[in-house]
Image (cartoon, grey):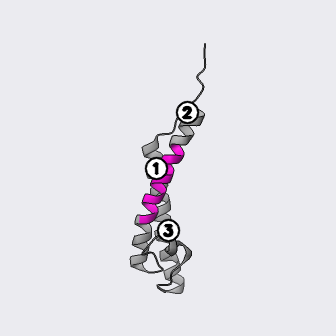
């Protein structure tokens, strides 16, 4: 079975980007907006614990996971689909 690279990449991007955004909102709900630079903020420029930071996290996370998902699906298809059955 082959993975659809576009669908898998979009799924990964949406899950990671939206997950990061909602996690940030969850932290803001309980601890408030701190604008503190987190470990993820060191990787994703502009991300911090704030509403604007959650949007930066959404964008960075979406494109990061989109690219990672496409690469994963491409590698999976390359290695898993190598042999064909002969009848």
Residue shown at the point (54%, 47%) measured from the top left = 72
> What is the x, y in percent for residue 38?
54, 78
Residue at disc 2, secondary structure: loop
| Residue 23 visible (yes or no) | no
Residue shown at the point (58%, 29%) measured from the top left = 82
User: What secondary structure characterizes most of the magenta part?
Assistant: helix
Mark linked to residue 20: 3
> What is the x, y in percent for residue 21?
46, 70
Q: Determine which residue is flagged by label 1.
A: 9
> What is the x, y in percent for residue 81?
56, 31
From the image, which quarter does the C terminus lie in? top right
**CA gap, disc 2 and disc 3:** 30 Å
From the image, which quarter does the N terminus lie in? top right
Residue at disc 3, secondary structure: helix
Q: Evaluate if marks 2 and 1 touch, with contact meaning CB atoms under 8 Å apart.
A: no
**CA gap, disc 2 and disc 1:** 17 Å
> What is the x, y in percent for residue 33?
47, 85
Counting other residues with Cα less than 10 Å from the Cα at mark 2, is it few (<14), some (14-19), or many (20 or more)?
few
Mark linked to residue 1: 2
**CA gap, disc 1 and disc 3:** 16 Å
Residue at disc 1, secondary structure: helix
Residue shown at the point (48%, 70%) measured from the top left = 22
């Amino acid at each position: 079975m082959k993975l659809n690279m576009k669908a898998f990449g979009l799924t990964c991007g949406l899950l990671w980007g939206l997950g990061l955004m909602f996690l940030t909102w969850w932290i803001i709900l309980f601890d408030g907006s701190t604008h503190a630079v987190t470990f993820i903020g060191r990787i994703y420029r502009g991300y911090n614990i704030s509403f604007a930071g959650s949007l930066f996290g959404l964008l960075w996370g979406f494109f990061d996971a989109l690219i990672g998902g496409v690469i994963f699906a491409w590698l999976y298809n390359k290695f898993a689909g190598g042999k064909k059955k002969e009848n």
